[in-house]
Image (cartoon, rainbow, N blue to C red):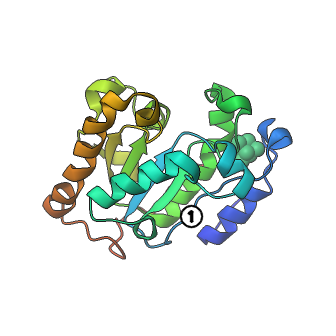
Amino acid sequence: MHFTTLHEVEDAIRACTKCPLAQSRTHAVPGEGPADATLMLIGEAPGRNEDATGRPFVGSAGKQLEAGLARAGLTRGDVYITSILKCRPPNNRDPKREEVTACTPWLIWQITLIKPRLIITLGRHAYAFFQKHPPFREALGTLYHLEAYDAFLLPMLHPAAILYRRQWAEAYYTLWEKLPHILKEKNIPLRGQKNQLTKHNI
Ligand code: SF4
């Protein structure tokens, strides 16, 4: 398979049957946002509302995400939002390794075409796809460089985490408030200035 536009990838995801989650989903959720976004947000997997609508981060977790973005002076329209798995695991269970293996070539195509300069992972599963060390809790809020994608990585808490553990809310919002400083320091505009990534690895 070869894709030249983000729309082609998104259409292929909607038709994907590469793993058993295709049988239980209502809608696959490819992601949404500007194709020239320089910030890419990557969550874990669609939940109930996302499965019902085909859109990422709607419902209560989506509200928390929008609140975090607002702390950074951003809106959903400024960023591309997607997830590691594009179909909902039953009862929102953790992704299985074989599902991640089957699904993440789609994510790599999205990164290859969008060429983000900063990838923000939301939660431990998205972080673990990009690097194993240091552990997620130690990595939170630290800026790394991902050589394979010529992009920076910023691990963040998943917005749903603060719905269950209110004590994490302060840390969650503090991380979002750091974001404008990181963008300024690394000279990353919101749109249009791509990195130089030209290769993909699938
Ligand atoms: S989770 Fe990914 S690999 Fe599995 S059916 Fe959905 S899009 Fe395809």
Query: Disc 1 beta carbon < 8 A from ligand 1?
Result: no
Residue 169 position (above or below residue 37): above
- Tell me the kind of residue under disc 1: Glu
Left or right position of 53 against 186: right
Is residue 153 or residue 146 the one in the foreground?
153
Quarter residue 142 falls in: top left
For the point 50% across and 71% down, the residue is 35
Q: Residue furthest front?
A: 166
Q: Is residue 157 visible?
A: yes
For the point 51% across and 52% down, the residue is 62
Mark 1 neighbour class, 10 Å CA radius: few under 14, some 14 to 19, many 20 or more: some
Residue 75: give x, y in percent of width and height.
Answer: 39, 66
Residue 38: give x, y in percent of width and height.
Answer: 37, 65
Q: Is residue 13 visible?
A: no
Q: Quadrant of ligand 1?
A: top right
Quarter residue 115 falls in: bottom left
Residue 186: give x, y in percent of width and height.
Answer: 18, 60
Which residue, given by chain and number where applicable, does mark 1 sit on?
32
Q: Residue furthest bottom?
A: 192
Q: Residue furthest right?
A: 23
For the point 68% across and 68% down, the residue is 8
Secondary structure of residue under mark 1: loop
Residue 171 position (above or below residue 193): above
- Figure quadrant of the N terminus: bottom right
